[in-house]
Amino acid sequence: MRARSDRAKVLLPMPVGSGYDYRVPADMAVAPGDFVRVPLGPRHMTGVVWGEADGAVPDDRLKPIFARHDAPPLSAAHRAFIDWIAAYAVAAPGSVLRMTIPVPEALDPPVPVTGYRMAATPPKARITPPRRRVLEALAGAGTVEAARLRAGTDASAAVLSGMAKAGLIEAAPVAVRPDWPAPQPDRPGVALSVDQRSAAQSLGAAIGEGYVAFLLEGVTGSGKTEVYFEAIAEALREDRQAIVLLPEIALTAQWLARFEQRFGVRPAPWHSDLTRAQRRQIWRAAATGTAPVVVGARSALMLPMPALGLIVVDEEHDQSFKQEDGVVYHARDMAVVRATLEKAAVVLASATPSLESIANVERGRYVRLELPERHGGAVLPAAELLDLRREGPPRGRWLADPLVKAMAETLAAGEQALLYLNRRGYAPLTLCRTCGLRLECRHCAAWLVEHRLAGRLECHHGGHTRPLPRQCPECSAEDSFVPCGPGVERLAEEVAGLLPSARVLVATSDTIRGPAAAAALVQEVQDGAVDLLIGTQILAKGHHFPKLTLVGVVDADLGLAGGDLRAAERTWQMLNQVAGRAGRADRPGRAILQSWRPDHPVLRAIAEGDRDGFIAEEKAARRRFAMPPYGRLAAIVVSGRRAEPARQMAETLARRAPAQADLAVLGPTPAPLALLRGYFRYRLLVKATRAVNLQAYIRRWLSRTPQPGGVRIKVDIDPYSFY
Ligand code: ADP
């Protein structure tokens, strides 16, 4: 069919179809990639011209495109990226597009927003550190948008309005500046070691030379961040943009400060904690090429960038890069795909790379760069296994005496300690001592977790909360509930009894909400206002605490339970990461791992620091069972408000699975979390060799199986969660 310039196919950010035809008005010209405003039923919507119309709709039924947005078009590479993810994840292209334009109003002309400027005659007032940062940022800067001011100074909205009230600054409307202050690549960085320099040179030389993928491996503190900063510097020198993905954005306060130290300004952030106005501005800055560097959580990968030259995925092994809802995708893997399509460099950095990435090095797809030692001669702490079978704590306690003794010694020496337990709340299980009833969530097949500080029970899967009942709903006994097992709050209680003078801080996602709280925590620890940190994985990543010399892992076996394919790998990664928090700079560190199974191969490998041994063993096991990265997996999760239709659908699917060589459909089985947020769930697992086109198979299979109403089917390619 010949292309007609009076029609165009427009992809809309919605989970259906792959684009609709629209009429192009005579006075308008559009090209693929243009952002356009189109009618959809009674509404208007922003979409992207995707290509030629398919011509099936008669002329008189075609609706016209209303307007073309004044914005750079979405590049051909980015459009190919969207189609690629949709095909790979078995998702609608429109759903993927929606991740690229999450704030469509960013395409509208900017409206004036609230800004602040220096007061002409500032009164005498108390100048706190955030206030000082604001005043410094405003000095000689005219009126600065509130959002930009906050991002640049870490001051809260309350600080700004407080300063305005005190007369230190004045509010005034200001047009949103489209650009982002430019990081300066040529400010002096640290003097790199020989190994660091060689790695930095390899990265730098690759920028602007087309697609290449690196795995940057080095223990915590070996300088991976400093090294990839040099790659960013090179991208900046070549006028290319860079995206940096970090696992938990709440933890990036220190990272941002280091970036600022190196490049003179902060990069544009992209994460869920931003206001809509901030997102609008940053999206526009990224899409127009005026934000040279964006750092963010996995969703930053979807931002349009006209001059992308580099993607960095820090802590590439981290599970939070896998998106489990909506379009199910892995941001690390998609970063590599995007780099391929954009002809850019991609750097995956980790102290404990994923087996997937290690396999890609072995297949010759990634270039491995290694930083063999910690900077400045600091040594990784020796991990000591504390055998709970022999030296376990007395009943009702969770910390064994040798660990408590080490904590006391560390604190007496004026140093800091960290207790790691990946369990929020007070106790993971509450049961009635009279009748044995376990308190469970009504909406999920899960126990309710007592949160004593908040005074309630909480479901860690669906988020449902309720007060702890005084009376057992089963046997009516009063005050009969007992907590079983420890959470971080319970550890804090135990420590208060054992080391009463220790200043303890509990850090979990309950207590550290957002970047400002994380920054405050880091400050407190660095200032020495805290002796002992007790926390979950929120503490395991990215922080550098110079005075922290002891790490105690309360339950090193926790992650090994359950039938998860990656249980050993994840435990290895997590424990290495946690142990890596101890002993930096000139102080040697100690890591003590409490375990009931100290002869487990994973724990032995950690104690012996045997990276190669662990990886060899884990690879052999995966190979033996043809599991990823040596085979392919996809999970199909069928769920519904009512159990029976969901179960039937899952069984119908299993029955109708087309026969195919080198592929097996396993299940269905009730999911381990058979009830989640009120949905009954059944799982099927598709297992195939690497030669099989899994997506084509699944599409064919699903399209042949009629789907009843009230039942949802989720396809999860390369699943990471098995509950
Ligand atoms: P990683 O990312 O591998 O954990 P970092 O890049 O964060 O390591 O480095 C750990 C610490 O050592 C940081 O405080 C960093 O600034 C410092 N550091 C690393 N390399 C050097 C160097 N060559 N000179 C000075 N400081 C360095």
Image (tube, grey):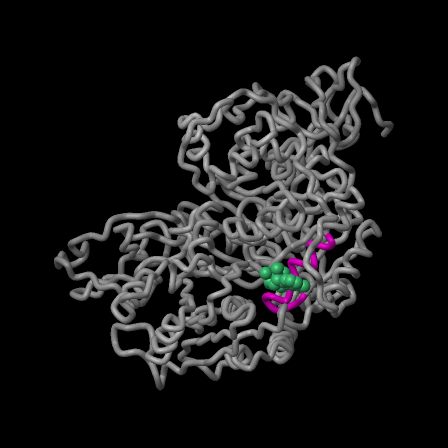
| Residue located 53% across and 61% down the image | 544
Q: Quadrant of residue 299?
A: top right
Per the rendered image, the range of residues in magenta is: 217-231
Q: Position of residue 211 (x, y in %)?
A: 80, 53
As for residue 229 lying within the magenta part, the answer is yes
Which residue is outermost to the bottom? 390
Does residue 382 sit above or below 332 in this rendering?
A: below
| Residue located 54% across and 77% down the image | 606
Q: Position of residue 107 (x, y in %)?
A: 65, 26
In the figure, is residue 517 to the left or right of 245? left
| Residue located 38% across and 64% down the image | 532
Which residue is outermost to the right? 2
Q: Quadrant of residue 333?
A: bottom right
Q: Position of residue 207 (x, y in %)?
A: 80, 52
Ligand 1 location (quadrant): bottom right
Q: Position of residue 129 (x, y in %)?
A: 46, 42
Q: Is residue 567 visible?
A: no
The residue lying toward the viewer, choosing from 644 and 607, is 607
As for residue 429 lying within the magenta part, the answer is no
| Residue located 79% across and 13% down the image | 27
